[in-house]
Amino acid sequence: MVDEILAGPPGEAEGPPVEPAQPRVGIHGGGFGDRIYSGVITLSALCVPALLLLIFWVITKAGWLALHTFGFGFLTSSQWDSVKQQYGAAPALYGTLVSSFVALVLATPLALGVAIFLSEFAPAWLRRPVAFLVDLLAAIPSVVYGLWGIFVLVPFLRSWVMPFLRDTLHLGATPFFSGPAYGPSMLAAGVILAIMILPYISAVSREVLMAVPRSQREAALALGATRWEMLWGAAIPFARSGIAGGVILGLGRALGETMAVTMVIGNRQEIATSLFAPGYTMASLIANQFTEATSDLNLSALMAVGFVLFVVTLLVNAGARWLVWRTSLETSI
Amino acid sequence: MRSVASRTSFRRRFVNGLMLGLTYVAAGVATLPLLFVLVYLLAKGVSAVNWSYFTSLPRPPGMGGGGAANAIVGTLVIVAGASVMGVPIGIGAGIYLAERKGAPLAVFVRFLADVLNGLPSIVMGIFAWELVVVPMGHFSALAGALALGAMMIPTVTRTTEEMVRVVPSTLREAALALGYTRWRTSLRIVLPTALAGIVTGVLVALARVAGETAPLLFTAFGNDFWSLSLNQPMNALPLQIFNYAISPYDDWHAQAFAGALVLIALVLIISLLARAATGRGFARASE
């Protein structure tokens, strides 16, 4: 009952408009058995908001000590000193944003290309196997990516890609690609994240592209557009906000990804502009420091990082869902 | 006039061909990492996957031999525990969403399930830590199962909903017309019809959580010895891979590769079973 009270009003406030006067068919009404059954499944459904509330409450409570002690400065301070009992999440916040940004920059064009390929251009015999392989990318556990990252990706980046970017392309002149090529780095984290979020972005983009009404495409083709012009001029504008939703969904994954990043980012509590330097993300900070936390305040600071991560991913995911939902509403008209 | 028209159309055809080609390249590049990962794991891991890997306990570095028997069993136990918590709630919530499609609460719950699905797994880890490990005073497999179970709920919910929705309404109406009560219609007619799809959803959720490491780091924690007690720390395959991967020992690295192969095989088998059930599956990325 408490759950119902808690969950009811916000549901009506936040939910999209619903056609009124649902006819009372379905699970309501009827005899005793029907009422029990209806109660059981309603209760199961209420578990979802209850769980989310519980997570929010538990993590807020756990991080409260640190949030209360450091206030807003928690997000801007770079100190993480268990001797002086000073904790700040700025490097982790920075690392999370930068590694996710790198991942998006790398993954979005590729994922869009894959989605367009699979929804428009792929010959029938290639469609299924390619879709299968790309889906499979999402099935590989994070820790396995991390393992591969440590032994293949990081050495490869250190010996080939970093020198190439810095010296051959002379990008070393910019602050982003300068400095010594450590292996474990922000760049490594970004690349591995890109691989991991690619299937998510491409799956959503593919779905919204396929949901574009046939009439849109045919109209463009009938006007003499090439297939690319049809896509660029008719299909993609229609699917735009859905694709944006897919990208943001990928961002949500990247922000919270833990194991693979922890294994390749180098775990250093410092803000460095160079992508070649090691760093931290919020998730990897928690994973890496948790078992070594020495005091209540230290532990609470880690929980507070978890709280920030929770809030950020919650907002990002809600935004993405809203975008995807809006597209599906538009295309269904 | 003529030449201008043909020049424009050449440019347009060129752009068309170029973009078409680029999507082929994108598809090729996107599948490369998968091949790299799989080939490398096979090359490094196959030699370490032997009988003793499946039957013996982990050994200290340098001793050689040793295996992950307890980690494999631990993963199965924890995932089973997670299913016990996650699957019934997920199926119940899914049925609710399917049967009350447009109700405000259904719209709200559907949205929250999607949001919950996107929460980082490490957040689930600290949630279970604070909820179970702190009050009990020690790490336990139960806490790990709780973290993974919570992660299963949204996936199971959404796939169940989808599967129940596609059951033809004529079936339901026929049962009701014959005098079946609503709950019996739902349990005896609708659910069996949607069963294959629901099983797929459960298996996809299982495959996803079986490979999770982050939620287990400070819940199940890991254990070098046999333990089947839910009240004790328990080893899990992803945990062992992680601990071995970041260690400096070569023989542990080899074991990590072997573990990765076994874990991927496990995840793939579950996913393929899911596909076999309905012809669809894998981490349905859009959910």
Image: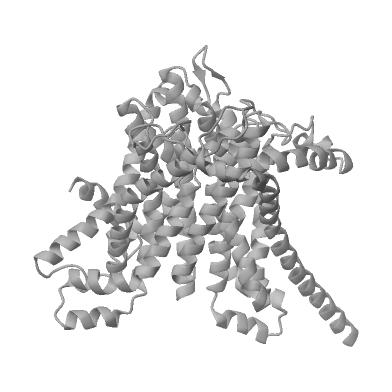
Numbered marks: total: 0
Q: Is residue B185 visible?
A: yes
Height in image: B23 above or below B51? below
Image position, residue A243 (x, y; %) = 57, 62
User: From the viewer's perspective, is A231 left or right of A252?
Assistant: right
Height in image: B256 above or below B96? above
Question: In this figure, which colouring scheme has been used for the structure?
Answer: one colour
Quarter of the rendering containing residue A66: top left
Q: Is residue A102 visible?
A: no
Height in image: B286 above or below A275? below
User: From the viewer's perspective, is B18 left or right of B188?
Assistant: right
Q: Residue furthest top?
A: A84
Height in image: B7 above or below A146? below
Q: Residue at x 23, y 47 (%)?
A: A3
Image position, residue A38 (x, y; %) = 19, 62
Q: Residue furthest left?
A: A32
Which of the pair A3/A221 is nearer the observer? A3
Image position, residue B222 (x, y; %) = 46, 33
User: From the viewer's perspective, is A158 left or right of B80?
Assistant: right
Image position, residue A324 (x, y; %) = 49, 62
Q: Residue at x 72, y 43 (%)?
A: A153
Quarter holding the C terminus of chain A is bottom left
Which of the pair A110/B277 is nearer the observer? B277
